[in-house]
Image (cartoon, grey):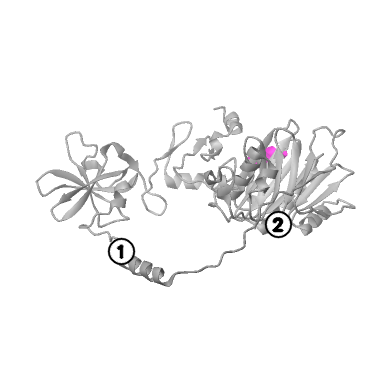
Amino acid sequence: MCGLVGCAGNIVRRDELIFKTLLVLDSLRGEHSTGIMAVNGAYVPTIIKTVGDPYQLFDTVAFGKIMSQKNIVLLGHNRYATSGAIVRKNAHPFENDVIIGAHNGTLHNKWELHNGRDFDVDSEALLNHIAEKGLDDALSVVKGAYAVSYYDKNEHKLSLFRNKERPLYYVINKKDQVLYWASEKWMLSVALSKHDVKDFEIVELPELHQYSFDIFNDVKQLDLKPVDHEITNLPVEEPPRANYWNETSFRQQFETNKTKTTLPPHLNILNSEYLTRKDVTLRVGLHQKNGKGAKYIQLFDENFPLYDIRYGYHKDCKLVSEDQGKYITASIFSCRKDGDRYAYMIDPNSIKRNVVLDLLGKPTKSFLEKDDKGNFYSPIAFAGKFKECGWCGDPLEYGNGNMIVGNTCFCKYCKEDEAVKEICKI
């Protein structure tokens, strides 16, 4: 269960407060992540989103910057994850070349949508299909529950639609020329009453009707009368299939599975999956000799302590005696038999040194963080100074591609944002 909220039209300070109140109330429907899209008077959209509740979004620099401009659309979403991981990129709204939108509901046939398999989240797949093939075509394919709000970047139109599986309500303040919407009726009632909006009527959006609104930056042109488009070409929902099973084949499968065992990590058993491991964190041990007298450096994987991992010793060896007890990362690329045991060999070209320990005393695969002046930060120093991204407010992870400028740290996503680059003069 997710939630949709928003306002559009002649937005003033009071409407921004109403929007924030709606976001907070809507978090009851989902607090895994929060996101908004704002369209300013020049029809330029901006999206910000974060993992967590609305208050984490309100505390970001990006949210303050958006609210300092004149906006004509504020579209919000609170996510309760049903498809896709709980990460910032999976938070709504989603943007493509044509529209920006948010979805409440769960779809049953994401793979049947246009390029549906390319998306982690069913909502993004639906919005992509709408952009590529049109709304009617999308809804002739999609099966499941949906209520959707989206903004057309080319036509400057806001659209709302739903099916019987999900609610959506709206209010048109004709006096001030502002449209409000929310997933639940009581949310609009509470938010509008709290901020002294008088004589409003809450209307339930009809099922399978697309209401679109022309959103102009000129109040004189603004007319929030919806254009109603009825959606008729819908897919036929298949009845649930009976679940029969063949008792004989089931017993055969059970007996087959019963004989399968997972290879335990002993020295004399080869684990073929381990041969594909990349950037494995290893502790450097002592110099040893194999059964033929050749030297090698013993390495230890603390996740697989019984594995025999080696680095062949030679004159150009990248590891020296001073590295003993320290951590490296390297990729496993071959395996050799030494007597009665298997020895896993690392790729010399994959070795990364200076691996440090995290706050729990475990080795981390990341290198030290460095700011724009060349100053390095240890994990403890980093955690003590930087808690969250200075732009989106997401929690920061040490060594995860962050960018430190002065006393502010930006996550790997926000550092690519044009607004961030402009602020930092990159």
Q: Identify the residue at image location x=38%, y=71%.
A: 251
Q: The N terminus appears in which quarter of the rendering?
A: bottom right
Q: Does the magenta stretch include residue 66?
A: yes
Contact (Cβ within 8 Å) of mark 2 with mark 1 = no
**Which residue in the protein does label 2 denote?**
166
Is residue 375 among what the camera can see?
yes
Is residue 14 among what the camera can see?
no
Indicate the amino acid at tag 2.
Arg
Magenta residues (range)? 62-67
Q: Position of residue 202 (x, y in %)?
A: 83, 54
Count of labels shown? 2
Q: In the displayed structure, would residue 47 be above or below residue 25?
A: above
Q: The C terminus appears in which quarter of the rendering?
A: top right
Q: In the displayed structure, would residue 220 be above or below residue 268?
A: above
Crowding near pointer 1: few (<14 within 10 Å), some, many (20+)?
Answer: few
Q: In this view, does 232 lie to the left or right of 55?
A: right
Q: Does the magenta stretch include residue 247?
A: no
Q: Is residue 381 left or right of residue 137?
A: left
**Which residue in the protein does label 1 denote?**
261
Q: Residue 368 carries which label?
A: none
Q: Where is residue 261 in the image (x, y as percent from the top left)?
A: 30, 64
Q: Where is residue 352 in the image (x, y as percent from the top left)?
A: 32, 39
Q: Position of residue 276 (x, y in %)?
A: 32, 47
Task: Give the secondary structure at mark 1.
Answer: loop
Give the Cα separation between the discs numbered 2 and 1.
46 Å
Q: Identify the residue at image location x=72%, y=54%.
A: 163
Indicate the amino acid at tag 1.
Thr
Q: Is residue 153 left or right of residue 286?
A: right
Crowding near pointer 2: few (<14 within 10 Å), some, many (20+)?
Answer: many
Quarter of the image holding residue 415?
top right
